[in-house]
């Protein structure tokens, strides 16, 4: 039986038709720095291109390749220059980097509800670190390839040229998804994204309540003995920082009492 001081924040918090699920992501070190990952990938890619150029390979300069997704009307956008590495070279660099570094561009998490998710960090529009955390399904909606093997990008937002968009490219068919919206330009598939927020030392992810139904049913022990209900005063939670808005999750977690059930065991 855990003491009052050691009590954890709740694993699940019901909020109307949704449920917030606690993860064990607690600090920046638990996440993958997307900007650093991109910089390392580009460094390795340049090395591959330089090695190919020294052997007489590489694409001729001066041309531009059309964007690999559907463009807007008669105003085609450009994906990259011909001097950039082609997709097969990029995919090979991805594989080599993953084999050597043993880390992908995101942190993989399995929720108590069974969801396999990816936490993305430090990509997209500039802002506070907590505003640059995104959560998506772990697999591409097209053929369910794990996106940990994909290429993370920080690309220019065509609607707001001064802004960036965090994107992930699936290496199998090169479909690219926006980490914030889940949209895939020019494709019908959409990557599922999840709201997330940081409360009391943990990142929580919101799922539909019906998806959390199984996890919300607390298992009962099969050993003998009587159930005993104990009213235990909730430990004082970490005080909300100045300027942090109140949230339904935070309000739920700040309740002063809860009922803990434990069973007497036979000695």
Image (cartoon, rainbow, N blue to C red):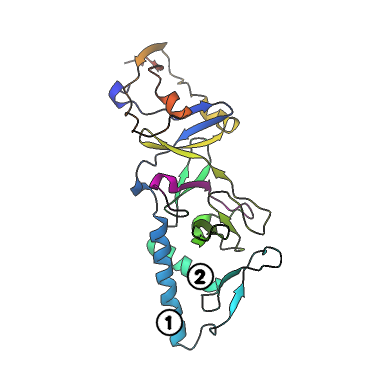
Task: Report x, y in % for residue 204.
Answer: 45, 36
Q: Alpha-carbon neighbours of circle 1 within 10 Å: few (<14), some, or many (≥20)? A: few
Viewport quadrant of the C terminus: top left
Q: Secondary structure at mark 2?
A: helix
Residue at the spot x=39%, y=34% of the render? 244
Residue 237 left/right relative to 16: left
Mark 2 → mark 1, Cα distance in angstroms: 14 Å
Please name the residue that numbered disc 1 is placed on: 51
Q: What span is colored magenta in the figure? A: 126-143
Residue 144 left/right relative to 201: right
Task: Report x, y in % for residue 158.
Answer: 57, 61
Mark toward the start of the polypeptide (2 vs 1)? 1
- Quadrant in the rendering for residue 236: top left
Q: Is residue 45 magenta?
A: no
Task: Report x, y in % for residue 98.
Answer: 43, 62
Tell me: residue 156, above or below residue 215: below
Please name the residue that numbered disc 2 is placed on: 90
- Quadrant in the rendering for residue 234: top left
């Amino acid at each position: 039986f855990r003491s009052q001081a050691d009590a954890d924040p709740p694993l699940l918090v019901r909020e109307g038709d949704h449920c917030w699920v606690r993860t064990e992501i607690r600090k920046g070190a638990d996440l993958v720095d997307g900007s650093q990952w991109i910089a390392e990938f580009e460094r390795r890619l340049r090395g591959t291109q330089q090695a190919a150029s020294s052997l007489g390979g590489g694409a001729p300069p001066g041309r531009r390749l059309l964007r690999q997704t559907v463009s807007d009307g008669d105003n085609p956008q450009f994906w990259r220059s011909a001097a950039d590495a082609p997709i097969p070279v990029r995919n090979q660099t991805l594989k080599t980097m993953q084999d050597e570094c043993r880390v992908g561009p995101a942190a993989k998490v399995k929720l108590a509800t069974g969801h396999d998710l990816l936490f993305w960090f430090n990509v997209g529009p500039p802002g506070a670190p907590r505003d640059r955390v995104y959560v998506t399904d772990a697999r591409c909606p097209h053929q369910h390839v794990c996106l940990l093997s994909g290429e993370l990008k920080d690309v220019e937002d065509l609607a707001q040229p001064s802004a960036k968009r965090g994107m992930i490219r699936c290496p199998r068919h090169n479909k690219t998804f926006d980490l914030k919206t889940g949209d895939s330009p020019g494709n019908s598939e959409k990557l599922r994204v999840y709201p997330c927020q940081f409360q009391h030392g943990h990142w929580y992810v919101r799922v539909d309540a019906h998806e959390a139904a199984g996890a919300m049913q607390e298992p009962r022990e099969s050993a003998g003995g009587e159930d005993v209900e104990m009213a235990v005063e909730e430990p004082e939670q970490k005080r909300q920082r100045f300027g942090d808005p109140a949230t339904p999750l935070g309000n739920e977690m700040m309740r002063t009492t809860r009922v803990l059930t434990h069973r007497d065991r036979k000695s």
